[in-house]
Amino acid sequence: MQATVLILGARGRFGLAAARAFADAGWRVLGQMRPGAQAGADQRIEWLATDLRDTQALTTAARGAAVVVHALNPAYTNAAWRDQVAPMMDAAIAVTRALDATLMVPGNVYNFGAAMPAVLREDTPQLAQTVKGRIRIGMETQLQRSGVRAVVIRAGDFFGSGRGTWFDAIIVKRIQKGVFTYPGRGGTGTAWAYLPDLARAFVAVAQQRTQLPTFEVLHFAGYQLTAQQWLDALDPLARAQGWVAPKAHVTLSRLPWPLLRLGALLVPSWAALLEMRYLWDTPHRLDNGKLTALIGPEPHTPLPQAARQALADLGLLARTPAAGPAPAVAR
């Protein structure tokens, strides 16, 4: 019997990646989007133009769904997070409870705070002092106390599958001019997640959900990357596209944090970015031992292939060969 998944926020970056991954695995996919939004082009997704707050209507439309994926995300300002994160989780919990389903939520490393150790495990103390970090801790506490079957899969910074991350907004914003802008210290390795890989991990965990306790947290390793490792992946692409001369390299530019600090007085999203600056100066990676014990090797696309497809998703490449399924290797 074909299993059914409901993706909340399926028109978003991660929501669409998750919807495609579940469809690839043979699931029936219901994609919730806000009324008035334009349905995506993927014919395998059944679009539900239903307001998230109308949980009764959403539950009725999604009857039979065994898994709910929370892919909702407010604007990247502290005010939006304060106002919207908890109500979004409340709605996701209500729908999941009514469907008697399992709720799956993407987590991040904000919970651990600036004093986080180099290796992050599921039992690493959560000592966040930032607004977003405290909200994320509260969100997971809210989920655990709800009593619904749920799993949080924590990952690093997203890239791939469209716009809305540090990768497209800052790092490769000027890549077609041969410039790579990096927010942190060159030698500091930080955690990254290629969204199609993370989405495939969600599918693999969903398929093993009966093996999990009522509430579980798993870590997705993805990549730990320095600025130089990004440059090593992007340099060949830049030369192939003619963005730099055949024997030249992409120029590394530093993010002008002092300028952001000045602008933060007027731009709330810049203030929110400043608060999370420590992430770029604190080396960290996620230990995925619990995840791989459950699903086997973590889905993992080699960085050059992932970087190329991420640029193609942004419409930056002149020629984009069809991308096949990414190989999975042990992580």
Image: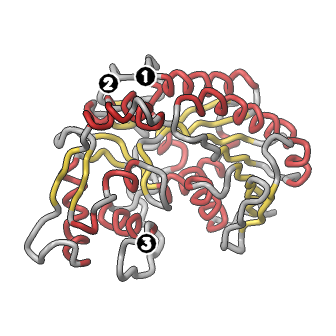
Q: Residue at x 50, y 59 (%)?
A: 196
Rounded to the nearest angstrom, the CA distance separating label 3 from label 2 is 37 Å
The residue to which callout 1 is attached is: 124
* Secondary structure of residue under mark 2: loop
| Above or below 286: residue 246 | below
Question: Residue 280, percent across and down?
Answer: 29, 36
Look at the image and tell me in which quarter the N terminus lies.
bottom right
Question: Residue 276, percent across and down?
Answer: 38, 31
Q: Earlier in the sequence, mark 3 or mark 2?
A: 2
Q: Nearer the viewer, residue 286 or 82?
A: 82
**Amino acid carrying mark 1 in the image:** Thr
The residue to which callout 3 is attached is: 315
Rounded to the nearest angstrom, the CA distance separating label 3 from label 1 is 39 Å
Q: Residue furthest front?
A: 266
Q: Residue at x 23, y 67 (%)?
A: 177
The residue to which callout 2 is attached is: 117
Mark whose residue sits in front, 3 or 2? 3
For mark 1, does the 10 Å Cα neighbourhood hold few (<14), some (14 to 19), or many (20 or more) residues?
few
Q: Earlier in the sequence, mark 2 or mark 1?
A: 2
